[in-house]
Image (cartoon, rainbow, N blue to C red):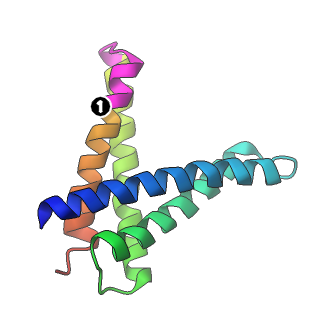
Amino acid sequence: MIRRKLIRYSIAGIINTIFGYFLGVILYLILVDFIDAYIISVVAGFLSIGFSIFIHRKFVFNSQNTYLTDLYSGGLVYGFVIVYSGLIFKIAIDFFGFSIFLVQAFVLVQGWGVSYILLNKVTFGNK
C-alpha cells in the first residue's frame, strides 16, 4: 500500500512539475508586457500549488476533506517546505561552500521526502 502510494505520488509530482513549468511559461508570455516577471512567477507558483493539491487529494491520498480544507493545510505544508528548503540551500552554499549542483539535488530530494511525509500526515491524514 505504501509503495503504491509512493509511486502515485511520484507520478503526480511529474505531472505537477510539467504543469507548473508550462503554466509559468504561458503566463509569462501572455502577461510580461503588463505585469512584472516576479509577480507572474508568484501567481504561477500559487496556481501550481493549488493544482498539485487537487491532484494529490484525488490521485494519491483519496482525501475526504473539502478542497478548501486540503488547500489550506496543503498550502501551509508547501510553504513550510519552501522555507525549510530555502534555508538548507542558503546554509549549504553560503556557510559551507557546497556546490550548487550538489545542493540543488539534495534540496529537491529532501523536499520531495519532507513534502510527502507532511502531506500524508498533516494535509491528507484522514485515512
Magenta segment boundaries in residue numbering: 95-106
Q: From the viewer's perspective, is residue 126 above or below residue 11?
A: below
Residue 90: x and y in percent read 39, 28
Q: What element carries label 1?
A: helix
Residue 8 seen in the figure = yes
Q: Quadrant of the N terminus?
A: bottom left
Q: Name the residue under label 1.
A: 106
Task: Find residue 88 and report its horizontal and vertical position in percent.
Answer: 32, 33
Q: What residue type is labelled 1?
A: Phe
Q: Which residue lies furthest to the right in this view?
A: 33
Q: Residue at coordinates 38% horizontally, 45% vertically from top-left? A: 83
Residue 78 in sight: no
Q: Residue at horizontal 48%, vertical 50%?
A: 17
Q: How crowded is mark 1: few (under 14 residues within 10 Å), some or many (20 or more)?
A: some
Query: Which residue is at 33% across, 35% downward?
Result: 107
Q: Is the magenta stretch mostly helix, strand or loop?
A: helix
Q: Position of residue 27 (x, y in %)?
A: 72, 54
